[in-house]
Amino acid sequence: MSKSSKLSQWFRRMRYSRLFIALLYLFLGAVLFFTLIGNVRPDKLDIKLLSIAKNSIHSPVTIEDRVTTEKRKREAAQKVPDQYTYHSEYKSNRVNVVESVFGAVKEVQEETKAVQPEQSDVSEQEQLQKLKKKLPAELVKSLSDQVLLELLNAPADQLSVARESTITAVNYSMSDQIDMNEADRAKEHIAEELQSVSVSAGLKASIVALGQYAVVPNYFYDPVATKERRKLEMDAVDPVFILQGQILVKEGDTITREVYKQLELVGLLADHRAFQPFIGLFLLLSVLLYFIYKQFDQFSKQQRSNKPYLFAYTIIITITILTMKTISIFQSIEYSGLGYLVPVAMGTMLVKLMIGDRFVFITSLIFSISGSIMFNEGITSALNYHVGLYLLISSLSVSVFLREKKRRSMILHAGTLVAVLNVVVLAALLLLRNGSLSLSEIALYFLVAVASGIVSSVLTLGILPYLESGLGIVSAMKLMELSSPNSPLLRKILLEAPGTYHHSIMVANLAEAACDAIGADGLLARVGAYYHDIGKTMHPHFFIENQMGMGNPHDSLKPEVSRDIIFAHVSDGVAVLEEHRIPKEIIDIAAQHHGTTLLKYFYYKAVQEDEQRYTEDMFRYPGPKASSKESAVVGIADSVEAAVRSMNAPTPEQIGQLVQGIIAERLKDGQFSECHLTFKELQTIEKTICETLNGIFHSRIKYPNL
């Protein structure tokens, strides 16, 4: 084996390994990062403090001036006075204290009368002790025994007056806001009020003491409320922003300390190392790569294919991004419309044709973001939203305009429609700007938009064949070219083995209908069926469909010789297809359509001659088994068509039994073990093939002899 062949085999093994896939993602990320990094790197100005500005300097970003904002917030907070809270519940609490004292006094008096009604003034100390037990310890400690005795000894009428007066005075005093500094004044005020009560001097002194005890501060400094009020005032201060495009310093002005800090804040100073744009770019690309990874992960599970789709996707993205980068280099020619020239539709066309529709959106998003970053020359923002939106719509339009993927002329048609859409979108963007452009400038913009669509289709037509042949991914357009009756190999089958050609057409009809029914690639199955028996052109008369009334040469051959001739049509067909560089998918169908099935006719013929000498394994096709749904379906259709053709005027019931039997036999023989066909799909295949055959072998009117 030559070194080039070994290298080719090694590469084919490597391109499906996890390491190679990881390297592809890293390479794709590196291409995007290093092509965009130069466009996100902020401009640097060599400016000194207190120097004179040579040019007017605009802010490249909108950013909050936090220093000024914090200064204004502090000033607003300092204007907020301390906050106090009035505790209204203190009034009722202190009134209840006064009521409890008079209530306890009355209880003791009544208890004394009940125990010793004949004695009016006995055991004052005993009464005093009873009263103290009924009162809180703090109150007993605060009021003297003399005060309590005066209350105990007061007549009922004076005690009632004292009670009402004290409660009224306490209630009135505690209704005011009393802070710590005003407590003494409040106590003096309640003493003045109670001095006018018409009771004995001793009782008056007692209620004054009780009233002063009941009056306490009810208005306290509230740190939480103060903090919240100051926070509200600070939050009410609007942030101070340096706006994108705002003039920070005019030409000829002095770079003051405040201006210098603003220049530093927006990242325009040479000694200011701003890593944020690079980190932002890295995070953005990481998200996009994650989306790509998830798409391919789901795609590979559905396709169950070992085609290098990720490799193809990486190449397409790289080609488009490098084209975009090359065009962006010429932004210095003072023309802002270069971004509208980028043929991004080329990338999405190639992705749609080679991989599928599901990747068009994420691809369009990548091109849109990349274009908006690359073509930001002359604007203060890091992203050119006009170019980004234009590229996004131009890319996405491929999903609408390239609906038919079976004719290469549709690429040019789609490119023309993309060009028209580009003009419409660009006109809308120019109108949204509300600027004044001359007719020549508008014409130039529209010319660029048209060129983008047309160039995209031309480049797609030029690149697609190289990607198909280089990566071994067959597109629908390639399949349609192979299915043309003018294809050299199909003409070879038609001229050298006409019976096989007709058989292949019938198999193709059955296989395409069945594959479409189960969601497989019907077009691939059709084209594969066209070529699956091309090996029969080597010895066409050894196959019954080409004998056309002539004698069967197998009648005079040994079974093993006939077996080798029949087996050879598979390997011969693979060799012919490889020689003509037919896509691998077609070659696989030709190689796998018989799997490892038993060549029954010649096996039974051999057993009749010598049962001990021959075994089943000797008459089984060498394989391999079908590795795709398309190969399996073509194999079923091949057997069914040959079997039905041998029947005379088959009925629908006979056809149904035949198809069911062939599928069941292949299933039992393990021929579907490598192609991921489900039982439900096999039932659908059976039903579809029967319906197709019933349409072919329907009953006809018997015409009278004339």
Image (cartoon, rainbow, N blue to C red):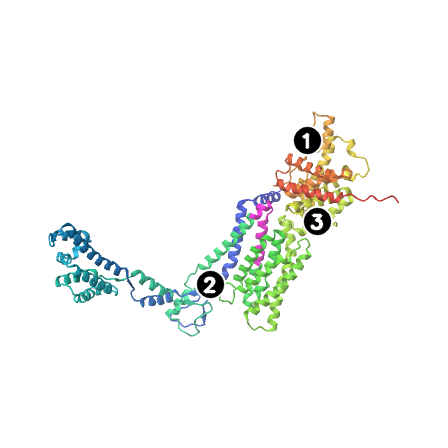
Element under label 3? helix
| Type of amino acid at the residue the image marks with label 2 | Pro
Classify the position of the C terminus by image quarter.
Answer: top right
Along the viewing direction, whichever of 684 and 622 lies nearer the viewer: 684
The 10 Å Cα crowd at callout 3, few under 14, some 14 to 19, many 20 or more, is many
| Type of amino acid at the residue the image marks with label 3 | Leu
**Mark 3 or mark 2: whose residue is earlier in sequence:** 2
Please say whether residue 583 is visible from this viewpoint: no
Measured as percent of width and height from the top left, residue 695 is found at 74, 45
Quarter assignment of residue 95:
bottom left
Please report the residue visible at 52 percent of the width from the left and 61 percent of the height from the top.
373
Question: Is 521 a magenta residue?
Answer: no
Q: Give the CA distance from mark 2 to mark 1.
A: 75 Å
Please report the residue visible at 78 percent of the width from the left and 32 percent of the height from the top.
555
Q: Give the CA distance from mark 3 to mark 1.
A: 35 Å
The 10 Å Cα crowd at callout 2, few under 14, some 14 to 19, many 20 or more, is many
Q: How many discs appear?
A: 3
The 10 Å Cα crowd at callout 1, few under 14, some 14 to 19, many 20 or more, is some
Please say whether residue 246 is visible from this viewpoint: yes
Say the numbered circle drawn on residue 42. Answer: 2
Measured as percent of width and height from the top left, residue 13 is found at 58, 43
Q: Which residue is mark 1?
A: 618
Please tell me whether residue 53 is drawn above or below residue 667 in the rendered image. Answer: below
Q: Which residue is mark 3?
A: 482
Quarter assignment of residue 276:
bottom left
- Residue range (magenta): 298-322
Question: Is 305 a magenta residue?
Answer: yes
| Type of amino acid at the residue the image marks with label 1 | Met
